[in-house]
Image (tube, helix red, strand yellow):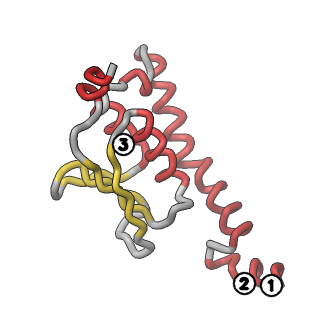
Amino acid sequence: VKQEEAKTAPKHTFKLVTDSLSNQMAIASLIVADLTKSQVETTVDPKAATNLSVETSPGIKLSEAFAIASYFAREGHKDNLLGKSTFAQSQVEQYAAFAASSLMNTVRLIEGASFGTNKVYKEAFDKARA
């Protein structure tokens, strides 16, 4: 089994940069990295140009959670995570698009209001805590 794992696991360390440890899309990418046994070095940079990116090799970067998660799945030879049939693959892409465009905006709004991480809600959050 260990020889099989050595063949399927990516051989180098990916460098993931996120704006926050609570970034849900970064967390989703890291879950796929874990499932595929990808080695990932995570850096938090609140001033990063994008809220999530991964360096796949020196100077080559990807952004957007679904692209990053798909890359980890393919590099780790776990393509089945992306769907076994053409229809299943399309369903995975459909959900990923929904999550990125609709769901995550709502999650970020709730997170910002609940934890004071959104500048718009920080004053109200701080006042409610007092």
Element under disc 2: helix
Decide: is 124 above or below 85: below
Badge 1: residue crowd in 10 Å (few <14, some 14–19, many ≥20): few
Mark 2–mark 1 distance (CA, rounded to whole Å): 6 Å
Identify the image quadrant of residue 112.
bottom right
**Image x and y of residue 65, in percent:** 43, 47
Location of mark 1 (residue)? 127
Could you tell me which secondary element the residue under label 1 belongs to? helix
Q: Is residue 112 left or right of residue 130?
A: left
Q: Give residue 67's mark.
A: 3
Q: Which residue is mark 2?
A: 123
**Residue 18 placement, left or right of 59:** right
Q: Earlier in the sequence, mark 2 or mark 3?
A: 3
Secondary structure beneath dot 3 equals helix
Q: Residues within 10 Å of mark 3 (few under 14, many from 20)?
A: some
* Disc 2 residue type (three-letter): Glu
Residue furthest toward the top?
A: 85
Quadrant of residue 48 in the image? bottom left
Would you say the residues marked 3 and 1 are in contact, meaning their CB atoms lie under 8 Å apart? no
Where is residue 111 shown, x and y percent of the image? Answer: 67, 62
Name the residue: 28% across, 27% down: 8
On residue 92, the disc is none
Circle 2/circle 1 CB separation < 8 Å: yes
